[in-house]
Image (cartoon, grey):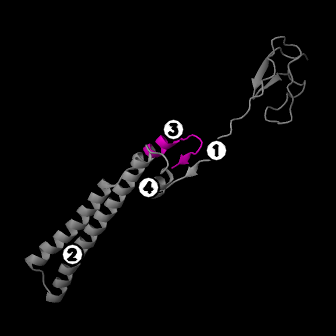
């Protein structure tokens, strides 16, 4: 049977479509396959031009604010942003830590007072409630004070746009 006058351009290789029983076309994923135009198709495309692959540098992976501030120190536009967010995260940790410690301590002292007196008094109930409330509120305050992942991505993307040869990845 004769070749069908149809060619496909698959992965840069023009493949003739054979009628049933005439053979198998070149596989498109075969790296050693040469360009084989269809012999019966006058409009078969020319071989594709070779394009050099652009080699990008490997990104440096960053996972925390302090390291990001340290890496961006040389850029006078990105560093103040990264440093401010790193300090904001440190302040959030301090607020949470102090509040949880003090609130937990108050709740613990009032619980121990109840155990020693063998009954609840109004002061121990309010003290326990206040201590637990302070613990929860300080944890929530620290959480709301902390910078978000969007802030981290903003700093990384700003750095990458200004320094395309020294990429950072979150």
Query: How much space separates mark 4 and mark 1, taking CA atoms?
Result: 22 Å
Q: Mark 2 points at which residue?
A: 107
SS for callout 4: helix
Q: In the image, residue 77 lies at what x, y percent?
A: 43, 43
Q: In the image, residue 125 lies at what x, y percent?
A: 13, 75
Q: Mark 4 points at which residue?
A: 65
Q: Are marks 4 and 2 in contact (CB under 8 Å)?
A: no
SS for callout 3: helix
In the image, is 100 to the left or to the right of 163? Answer: left
In the image, is 106 to the left or to the right of 92? Answer: left
- Tell us which disc is closer to us: 4 or 2: 4
> Is 137 drawn above or below residue 149 in the view shown?
below
Q: How crowded is mark 1: few (under 14 residues within 10 Å), some or many (20 or more)?
A: few
The span shown in magenta is: 154-170
Q: How crowded is mark 4: few (under 14 residues within 10 Å), some or many (20 or more)?
A: many
SS for callout 1: loop
> Splitting the image into 4 quarters, where does residue 1 fall?
top right
Instruction: Decide which of 7, 95 is in the foreground and name it.
Output: 95
Q: Does 167 lie within the magenta span?
A: yes
Residue at 51% across / 53% down in the picture?
Answer: 71
Q: Name the residue under label 1.
A: 57
> Is 67 drawn above or below residue 109 in the view shown?
above
Query: How much space separates mark 4 and mark 2, taking CA atoms?
Result: 33 Å
Query: How much space separates mark 4 and mark 3, taking CA atoms?
Result: 19 Å
Instruction: Decide which of 46, 85 is in the foreground and name it.
Output: 85
Q: Residues within 10 Å of mark 3 (few under 14, many from 20)?
A: few
Q: In the image, residue 13 lies at what x, y percent?
A: 80, 26
List the single residue furthest toward the top. Answer: 42
Residue at 27% across / 72% down in the picture?
Answer: 101
Query: How much space separates mark 3 and mark 1, taking CA atoms?
Result: 14 Å
Q: Does 106 lie within the magenta span?
A: no
């Amino acid at each position: 049977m004769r070749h069908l006058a149809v060619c496909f351009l698959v992965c840069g290789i023009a493949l003739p479509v054979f009628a049933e029983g005439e053979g198998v076309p070149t596989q498109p994923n075969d790296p050693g396959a040469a360009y084989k135009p269809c012999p019966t198709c006058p409009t078969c495309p020319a071989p594709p031009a070779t394009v050099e692959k652009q080699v990008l540098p490997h990104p440096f992976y960053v996972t925390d604010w302090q390291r990001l501030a340290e890496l961006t120190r040389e850029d006078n536009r990105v560093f103040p942003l990264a440093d401010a967010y790193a300090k904001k995260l440190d302040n959030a940790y301090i607020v949470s830590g102090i509040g949880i410690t003090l609130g937990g301590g108050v709740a613990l002292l009032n619980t121990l007072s109840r155990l020693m007196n063998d009954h609840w008094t109004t002061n121990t109930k309010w003290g326990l409630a206040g201590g637990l409330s302070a613990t929860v509120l300080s944890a929530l305050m620290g959480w709301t004070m902390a910078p978000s992942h969007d802030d981290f991505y903003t700093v990384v993307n700003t750095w990458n746009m200004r320094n395309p040869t020294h990429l950072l990845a979150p």
